[in-house]
Amino acid sequence: MFISLIIPVYNRPQEVRELLESLVRQTRRDFEVVVVEDGSAPECSSDEVVREYADRLDIRYVRQPNGGPAAARNTGAANARGDFFVIMDSDCLVPADYFETVYTEVEACGIVFYGGPDMAAPDFSPLQKAVSYSMTSVFTTGGIRGNRHSIGKFSPRSFNLGISRSLFVEVGGFSDMRIGEDIDFSMRVMATGAQARFLPDAKVCHKRRTSIRLFFKQVFVFGTARINLDIRHPESRKALFALPSVFTVGSAALLLAALCAGPWFRLAFVAVAVLWALGTSVQWGGLLLLLFGIAYAPWWFILPFGTLMALWFVDAAVRNRSVTIGWLAVWTSFIQLYGYGLGYLYGFWLRRIRGLEERDTYKVTRFFSQKTR
């Protein structure tokens, strides 16, 4: 078996550099790297970065006009030499034993399709670690992105996915979906009868978003994509995916009731909103909101939100051994749920209520996807 690692990239030369540097340190080196430049701006090309590693890695560099991550992965597969493909996002870092683990597991168990978990590296920023918690915790996403205790069926994702060349060809590669294409791919693969194996030891470090704004945009896009996936794959519909929308609508109703019930809470909420608009960080803005809530909000508002915040805070703080990350995780978890929930509702409005086509959902999310890939 010979592995081809396929990496689509869009305007991320520095992240490609970090990824390639992690590949140089692999304990097993019999793999090739295929970097596909997906229409990046000339000043953001990874061409020079790839040349720097040409003498240290078996690497090739392919350009294509911007067509999205799905098209870039298909291009990478068409230019790969391996009989087994590993697909990753460009913002990942690979632990030194990753390929040794994959070779051992795949060859020993005859695996044709697998996914692995993602995690935060020790040197990631506190915000990146908080975002990582919000995207992987059972208490936020149900662990569906790769967790031993997942409450949803596991589908390999494009940040850490492996598949045999023959199976990739059988399903025709990635579809023309612009967003949610990796979940669509996994569903089509599993529809052939192939089992999706979860390899808990084949971890990658996923850098995720570096700002609250970009994180919100990313999860909004994911929420919108879920409606398109439900329409393409009706058998995949689950109440789990609608829960963030229920949470979003329920919390909005609860907040409205609290604002109507307490004039001082109403004034305090507006004051905090103004502070945030003026650039107050999420840490301090969140603290002010919490303090004003405790002082002025009714108990029936504080109790459910306070319990949930305490759960996130304690779990994230213990997992990361950091009170700072625990505090940040409270707010990134809210953003994860609200962003995904709003995106889901937006997609529902466009597709289910207005009856528009899938391509119409890309008109507003295309900007998001370009900024968050």
Image: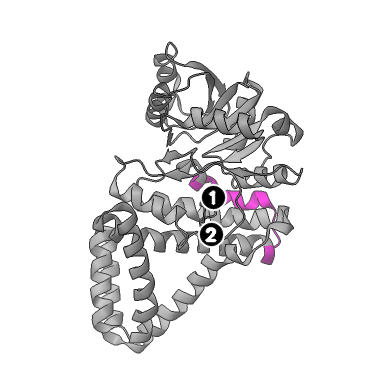
Mark carried by residue 365: 1
89 relative position to 279: left or right: right
The structure's colour scheme is: one colour
Q: Quadrant of residue 75?
A: top right
Mark 2 lies on residue: 343
144 relative position to 215: left or right: right
Figure check: 241 above or below 184? below
Q: Is residue 5 visible?
A: yes
Q: Position of residue 51 (x, y in %)?
A: 43, 14
The answer to whether marks 1 and 2 mark residues whose Cβ atoms lie closer than 8 Å is yes
Labels in figure, total: 2
Task: From the image, give the main secondary structure of the stretch colored magenta.
Answer: helix
The alpha-carbon separation of the residues under discs 1 and 2 comes to 9 Å
Q: Residue furthest top?
A: 55
Q: Residues within 10 Å of mark 2 (few under 14, many from 20)?
A: many
Q: Position of residue 162 (x, y in %)?
A: 60, 35
Q: Position of residue 257 (x, y in %)?
A: 41, 84
Say which of 124 and 215 sits in front. 124
208 relative position to 242: left or right: left
The residues colored magenta run: 352-368
Q: Position of residue 128 (x, y in %)?
A: 35, 47
Figure check: 266 above or below 170? below
- Residue occupying the point 51% across, 32% down: 101
**Which SS class for mark 1?**
helix
